[in-house]
Image (cartoon, rainbow, N blue to C red):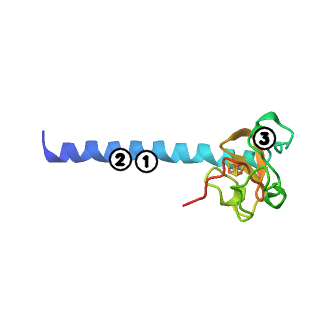
Amino acid sequence: MSSDHSTIISRRRFLELTACCAAAASSLLPKVSVAADLPHLSMKDSAAVALGYHEDTRKVPSSKYPSHKPAQECGKCRLYQGAPGAQWGSCMIFPGKAVHVSGWCSAFSPRP
Ligand code: SF4
């Protein structure tokens, strides 16, 4: 086979991969807008209670969570997936629910 044939195959493969990536990216866009419509996580939800979730990090009782720091909040957590500037966003710990950008739970993990 000639190198021209190999080049054509490589270009074809490149175009296929590009189309695939574009399709994958476009499928993610609706998820971002849907995240804003998610029901808010209730502090009474059993999973929320188990992880000490609070909508306002300033109201987390230090007596119960001594490792909590007031500067820790969902918006600074690597598990938070809210859009920039949004008050609520999804969290990988609580699928299907939105947490408050100023919230906190004991699974907090700072963004690098
Ligand atoms: Fe907030 Fe992070 Fe806890 Fe999710 S895991 S509720 S983003 S602190």
Please identify, in this view, whether the residue under mark 3 or under mark 1 is nearer the observer: 3
SS type, badge 1: helix
Left or right side of 32 for 17 = left
Q: Which mark is residue 18?
A: 1
**CB contact under 8 Å: marks 2 and 1:** yes
Tell me the CA gap for discs 2 and 1: 6 Å
Residue 14 is labelled as 2
Which amino acid does the dot numbered 3 rest on?
Ala
Which quarter shows the C terminus?
bottom right
In x, y percent, where is residue 25?
A: 55, 48
Q: Which of marks 3 and 2 is in front?
A: 3
Q: Which residue lies furthest to the left in this view?
A: 1
Q: Which of the image's four quarters has the N terminus?
A: top left
Disc tally is: 3
Task: Judge the density around disc 1: few (<14), some (14-19), many (≥20) Cα neighbours within 10 Å.
Answer: few
Q: SS at mark 2?
A: helix
* Residue appearing at x 76%, y 59% in the figure: 86
Q: In this view, does 27 lie to the left or right of 91?
A: left
**Disc 2 Cβ-to-ligand 1 distance below 8 Å:** no
